[in-house]
Image: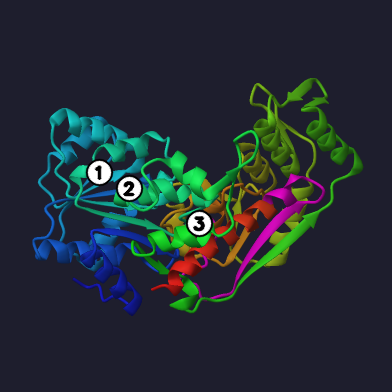
Amino acid sequence: MNFTPYDYQQKIKDEVVKKNEVLELVDMGLGKTAPTLQAIETLFYQCMICRVLIVAPLRVAKHVWPAEIEKWGFNLSYASVLGTQKARLKALAQETQLHIINVDNIKWLVEHQIKQKCWPWDMVVIDESSGFKNWSSLRFKAMKKVLKRVDRMVLLTGTPTPNSLLELWSQVYLLDSGKRLGTAVTRYREKYFNSDYMGYNWTIKPGAEVEIYKLIEDLTITMKSEDYITLPECIHIDVPVTLGKAQLKLLKKLEKQFFLELENVDIEACNSAVLAGKLLQGASGAVYDTEKNYHEIHDKKLEALKELLEEAAGENVIVVYNLISDRERILKWFPHAVNIKEEGAIDAWNRSEIPLMICNPKSAGHGLNLQSGGNIIIWFSLTWSLEFWLQMNKRIHRTGQLKPVRIYRIIAEQTIDRRVLGVLEGKQKTQDALIDYLKEKQ
């Protein structure tokens, strides 16, 4: 084995070896995978485990875990349970120490193994456990069925509560079957949160945060990057753009009436959630009709993007978009841009061969290293998801980055953009409070 852990990684490894239930709240970029693999190797050597199941987002399952095993020379055999059902069954039949599966196939795996009346994995590692934050999801319900057959459970995440402390319940349940936060989410919610009169929105009760933190502190190992590694400065820069009166009038009308009449087409929002999406589309410059065709209403963000690229003066830039319309409109203005999904794009970026790369945060988050290719991210359009926001930014602001990182946010003034930014900053405070408290207790 070629892996020599840093002191903080040694602590991760030791905790996973020592405890049957571990929640690794470790900042993105610190490196959770290698020390977890080292712990697994140690547990095999000590004859403490028989077989391990690794559950991760598809790209992480396909590339990151196998790459880490090979890179560091861990003495661990593995099979990737990915692809077609035939390929997955073939991988399952292999007598290996580790099986690696993507999170979207966990329901299939559980159902298959229940039919076989067999669950061979006495240890389960869930990478990016925030993917199990929804207690009503099929993946959570599937894992819940086999918890009694799992002796060791390890959860890894850098974003445990992207939206609310409500999202902790299901992740902690996978570790302790409800011993700490209760066996039912309804009781957890009623005990620690207040509801609005409709029962849709829940806010934390005074003092409940600390109580929750205390209940789970024995499960957690918590690390923030600034405490262990020195990274270049990360600067967030807002780039406001001002829409014309006619364009603002259109968006205000849509917001008020849930309806907008454009030339030859009507734009309609059937409820508040759809309206929020339409307003975000409009802030970026194009709104979709019911036939999924988009209609441009302004180019202000594209003009701002052009200026930012000129200011970059040849430095490599990543532009983040959230809508297909964003992507298509960016490519019309900047046809030399390369989509991160193109074959070989990531490697080419890290060789500094791509001056302008575009990506959607859904496909460029967990486990991806982009720090070698550049130090500038421009958010063309924002996302409501704190997880996507943090994960995307950490792709370049991580170990190995040598320059100060600049993260630009193009904001359409007097639109929903400002509201989204405020929501992201509010969620960040909640998550930071959790991690800071638990860190102090270690």
Q: Taking the image as drawn, is residue 49 in sight?
A: yes
From mark 1 to mark 2, how far is it between C-alphas? Answer: 7 Å
User: Which of marks 3 and 2 precedes in the sequence?
Assistant: 2
Residues at marks 2 and 3 touching, judged by CB atoms closer than 8 Å: no
Looking at the rendered structure, the secondary structure element under dot 1 is helix
Q: Residue furthest right?
A: 245
Residue at 79 percent across and 34 percent down: it is 255
The disc placed on residue 391 is 3
Can you say which quadrant of the picture contains the C terminus? bottom left
The residue to which callout 2 is attached is 174
Of 264 and 37, the residue lying toward us? 37
Disc 3 crowd rating (10 Å Cα; few below 14, some 14-19, many 20+) is many
Residue at 47 percent across and 60 percent down: it is 211
Residues at marks 1 and 2 touching, judged by CB atoms closer than 8 Å: yes
Of 376 and 75, the residue lying toward us? 75
Taking the magenta stretch, the answer to whether it contains residue 399 is: yes
User: Which of marks 2 and 1 precedes in the sequence?
Assistant: 1
Disc 2 crowd rating (10 Å Cα; few below 14, some 14-19, many 20+) is many
Q: Amino acid at mark 2?
A: Leu
How many marks do you count on the picture?
3
Q: Amino acid at mark 3?
A: Gln
Magenta-highlighted residues: 392-420
